[in-house]
Amino acid sequence: MAEKPTDHHKGVVLRTERISRHMVRVVVGGDGLADFATAGMTDHYVKLVFPYEGVDYPEPFSVKTCRETMPRETWPRLRTYTVRAWDPDTRELTLDFVVHGDEGLAGPWAERAVPGDELLMLGPGGGYAPDPAADWHLLVGDESALPAIAASLERLADRVTAHVLVEVDAPEDEQKLETAGDARITWIYRGDRPVGERLVEAVRALEFPEGQVHAFVHGEAGFVKELRRHLRIERGIGMDRLSISGYWRTGADDEAWRAVKRDWNRQVEAEEEAALAS
């Protein structure tokens, strides 16, 4: 019997669904998720593992072993995706994929996925859930943040105030968002403008309610940087009240963005500290 892998989970596609013009939902399950567990966050994520076709990988397969023993150009590619939902009773994991035809790696896989296909993944990680002690919540993002925003809205208690601003290409990319909270949901249509430009304008124009906010702002790194500076410096919100990060960056794939993200974040932090000290 083959040794059980220790660094990844294996899901089997159960069903797929196109939930908007540019988003496909894939539900995976199976015995390979027996050890999968989340910790109550609404931004849990997994790193999907895509081995190269035609490459002989060590058995039993392990991402760690591949990185220790194989040339870098053959390492399996990783793509980070938010957990839209996890049901430990049925052992079903739901992932939503932004798709644009043949563009990218995971999106095309999701469009072609059929029941029985296998999906390897690392994780989950995560660190945010709406603070029940907050007076109100701010949820902001592009399509890549929609799964976490949707999961966060489902966690809000009855009549809790939330301002939700989501940027998508066009009305056909909207989704139905469920919540018991008092959520003011604004869909912003990008059109032919750069990703996040309209979103930044909308957040700047928003009249913030009184009281302590807990904010979640994620998506393309360029607009996230602008909004981070706006929220921290102009609105005076502390980092302890912010979950804010660039999920992706225009012109870079996941590997390229991960390679520079830590240094990029340090530079952003240094610029903010200098601005706050001036």
Image (cartoon, helix red, strand yellow):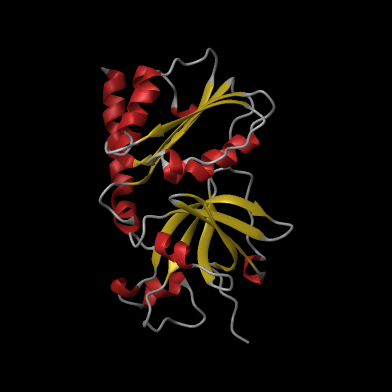
Q: Nearer the viewer, residue 172 or 148?
A: 172
In x, y percent, where is residue 260? 28, 50
- Please, which residue is most extreme toward the top here? 210
Residue 187 relative to residue 159: left or right: left
Residue 76 in percent (x, y) is at 39, 70
Front residue of this view, candidates 165 and 187: 187
> Looking at the picture, does residue 137 appear above or below residue 247?
above
Q: In which quarter of the image is the N terminus?
A: bottom right
Q: Which residue is drawn at 37% across and 55% down?
A: 100
Q: Which of 266 and 94 is in front in this view?
A: 94
Instruction: Tell me residue 168's x, y (percent).
Output: 40, 39
Q: Residue furthest bottom?
A: 1
Q: What's the residue at 63%, 33% (across, down)?
A: 179
Whether residue 243 is visible here, answered yes or no, is no
249 versus 231 height, above or below: below
Q: In this view, does 19 lie above or below 246?
A: below
Residue in view at x 32 percent, y 35 percent: 223
In percent of width and height, residue 214 lies at 53, 27
Instruction: Kindly indicate the quadrant of the structure image that contains residue 136.
Output: top right
Instruction: Give the residue furthest to the front.
Output: 172
Question: In this orientation, which residue lies closer to the viewer: 43 or 241?
Answer: 43
Q: Residue at x 67, y 70 (%)?
A: 31
Whether residue 219 appears in this view of the structure is yes
Q: In this view, does 68 lie to the left or right of 85?
A: left
- Quarter of the image where the C terminus is located: top left
